[in-house]
Amino acid sequence: MSEAIIRNQTVNLISKILHPLTESNLIPFPEYREIVAQLRNIANKGEPLPVVVPKLLTMEETANMLGISLANFKKQEPYLPFKRKYVGHGIRYRNTDVIRFILADSQDKQPDNDQTGNN
């Protein structure tokens, strides 16, 4: 499993082939983005992204998903890459963004711990 099933060059080629089909409305743009995102994840990590029903999360729910306290989440929130949705007076976060962050974070940090970490 050390070799990716799909190369990044192949994903780029498929992306370029499919893009004109989105402009002619044969493939909806969200579907195109999902196809490309799934292929990129397979190329980079050897497995597709998990299937998740999209929903908006409160600060408390997001902190729980990340495994940190609400107070710590509020301190770190400006530095997190999540898109914020304002619903009334409250802020909500997409669970898909949080899950992608968790998966990327856990996958990316493992090699850095073994190396010098000069990033």
Image (cartoon, rainbow, N blue to C red):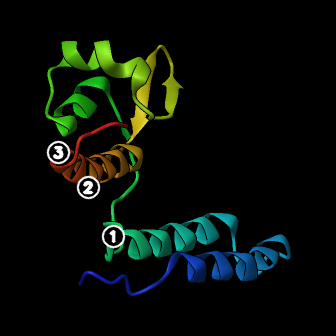
Amino acid type, residue under disc 1 in the picture: Lys
Above or below residue 47? Residue 71 is: above
In the drawing, does residue 60 fall left or right of residue 13?
A: left
Q: In the image, which disc is placed on residue 107?
A: 2
Residue plotted at (66% across, 75% down): 15
Q: Residues within 10 Å of mark 1 (few under 14, many from 20)?
A: some
**Mark 3, residue position:** 113
Residue 46: x, y in percent? 32, 77
* Secondary structure at numbered mark 1: helix
Residue plotted at (49% across, 29% down): 84
Of residues 60 and 107, which is closer to you in this image?
107
Q: Residues within 10 Å of mark 2 (few under 14, many from 20)?
A: few
* Secondary structure at numbered mark 3: helix
Q: In the image, which disc is placed on residue 45?
A: 1
Give the CA distance from mark 2 to mark 1: 8 Å
Quarter-wise, where is residue 2 in the image? bottom left
Amino acid type, residue under disc 2 in the picture: Gln
* Secondary structure at numbered mark 2: helix
Which one is earlier in the sequence, the residue at label 2 or at label 1?
A: 1
